[in-house]
Amino acid sequence: MDKITPSKFNYILVLLLFTLSILFQNTYLSNAFAVDFIKLEHEFSGKGSTDGAFGKDIHIAFNKNIYVSDTENRLIQKLSPTGQFLFQIPEDPESPDNILRKPGHLAVDNIGNIYVADITAHHIAETKDPKIYMFAPCVRKFSPTGELLHTYFVDPVDEKPGVVLPAKLIIDENGKTAFGIQPTGHDRALRVAVSDDGQLYVLDAKRGRIHKFKADGEKVRTFGRYGAGDGEFDKDAADIAIDARGNIFIADAGNHRVVKFDRDGKYMSSFGRKGRNNGEFVRPMALTTLPTGEVLVKDASKFRRKVGGLPEVIALSPTLTQLTESTPSQAELADTITNATRPQYGPFAYNPNATVNAANLNRRLRLLEEAEYLRYYEDNEYDEDDKELAEELKRADIRLTLFHNVISRVQKFDNNGRYIGRIIYETDQLSEEKHDLTFLDLDSSGYIYLRDTSDFTIAKYSITGFTVKPSHMNGFYSSRVANLNNKYTEDYEDIDFSTDVEDKLNQLELKNLFGWTYSLSERWHLTFLDELTYSEQDERYTTPAKIEDSFDFETQALENAFAANLKYITNPNPYRYKEINLSVGRVDGTSDLTQDALFPELNKQRRLDTGDASSTVLELNWDIWSRTNLWLRYANLNPSETSRNFIRRFYDVSGDLYEVFGSRNEASQFLGELTIKF
């Protein structure tokens, strides 16, 4: 058989679709602003209790250096910009003199003073024998060298209770019996931020308030309230940030927005709403302001990319058995083409007799980024037996998954809340080392910090522009070899037992499947699939009783099936989900078949078959509305009714050509379908 090279058409399609994807994205980005990616700068920290290592629950702040509060180990550490340990507060966290009880969110001012949210027991003045202490949330201020400068309270702590309250018996710092009052919310979390002029702002989300303090500790004012209207925020507001002008920004998680106040606490505006489109949020969880005035907002939305098992690309050319039919009928070849050039699986599948069913109509929801599979193993409300089951489900999911990436985003806004662009990053859920990277924080220079929840290392990432990065690509390769040897001996119906027919059959199949995917952004997704199959069969058919009828039969076939899909999710909301898919498919195949008499000195009869196939499919699948889908398919099927366009040559017993039979058939199809769900 002559050397067969894959069709150049496949590579043209690859280049065309990839170029088209870049053009689509560039066009989209020119209208919807920039998409940026992240690049690893360095890693630091780890699991421990001192010298740059931390426990599970930490908060992080920045001011040239890095400051980390460690709730579990009751300390604050100062690190260099690259994560090297500098010093900690206190020097001995195990000392009974350690005043930190539950250090949480923290901030650092321009001169290096450290502000950390905590809880404490405050002695109510003028109470003694016994003393009465009021447990309350507070903010502690430390100097750049670690000395305690001041303690700020957001609740009244010096007033004696006006009513009878339950209290706990405690031992005070002098070893004497005292009473401690623990009102509801005494251990609630606070968030802190410091303006450029040293004003402290404390977000008390559970009370729906923001408190402003002067540098000397005097409370200036309280503003904000619980709700969803102007100047209001929910009780799970997640973060606070202050820009260079003194404006205050609140990440209002429950209302899926950011609320803005001026330096005096006057409501100015809010931006964002619930959703996954540009400028929309799913529970904003962290924000920071840049020196240039822009605001970075990280929300909880996650876009999932999952491919399970080996995808059906395009059912390939005839099977070995069908290739070796000595005289295949037109009906058999027509059946073959149904599973070959007219695929029933993958992105180009079409079954005109199929009825619309709910499973097919909702298939994308099951594969959606917000799929429910996380509930199996990330829900902390499971009991131990359920957790064990959840882990098993997770392992099963991983075994069946080629790749599963989670894409997260950070959006950028101008100072007035106008959307500018976004940064996206991926975590590989199949990576043992990187699958549990979680978002930690943003700094005012725009760096992103992720933390590994297994070994507690912290990774610092810078922001880069859009490029085709190998780190954002996923691929797989599968190779299959099948070699079958069979021997048949037959004795026909007579009175003796002797060999009338001996048939030796060898079959070989080599198959290579390559898949490549690339997330151009959290919405754009490009997939290439290519399956190359080589198959051959050698059959030696011997009839001892009539040796001149023995023959040798050989067939070889090479087929390449290529599929490409460009997807854009126009609306990722699971209840209003819409996407548009542009797909291209191409099948190129060739086969050679020879049948020669086994003993040419007795019989020179032979047969030569050569065949080829080249079919193209273009498909558009578009969710015009969330309940309306338009499907268009154009196919150029060549051949359309057989496995190959072929030429068959027959030679007689003398070796002379006596018949040539050729068949070439081609069809063009255009199919359209509109589906409306009620």
Image (cartoon, grey):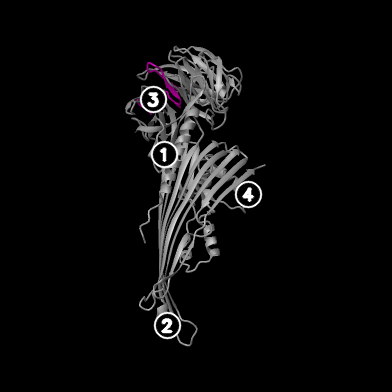
Q: Which mark is residue 357?
A: 4
Residue type at mark 2 is: Ala
Is the residue marked by circle 2 packed among few (<14), some (14-19), or many (20+) residues within 10 Å?
few
SS for dot 1 = helix
Q: Residue, x 63% and y 49% (percent of image)? A: 356
SS for dot 4 = loop
**Relative vertical location of residue 245 with respect to residue 205 in this rendering, above or below:** above
Residue type at mark 4 is: Asn
- Residue 257 is situated, as x and y percent measured from the top left of the image, at 55, 26
User: Are dots 2 and 1 in contact, CB under 8 Å?
Assistant: no
| Magenta part of the chain | 91-116
Is the residue marked by circle 3 packed among few (<14), some (14-19), or many (20+) residues within 10 Å?
many
Compare marks 3 and 1 and give the one earlier in the sequence: 3
Chief secondary structure of the magenta portion = loop
Measured Cα–Cα span from mark 3 to mark 2: 94 Å
Compare marks 1 and 4 and give the one earlier in the sequence: 4
- Give the residue at mark 3: 67
Q: Is residue 145 magenta?
A: no
Question: Can the viewer see residue 108 in this picture?
Answer: yes
Q: Nearer the viewer, residue 155 or 663?
A: 663
**Relative vertical location of residue 554 with respect to residue 236 in this rendering, above or below:** below
Measured Cα–Cα span from mark 1 to mark 4: 35 Å
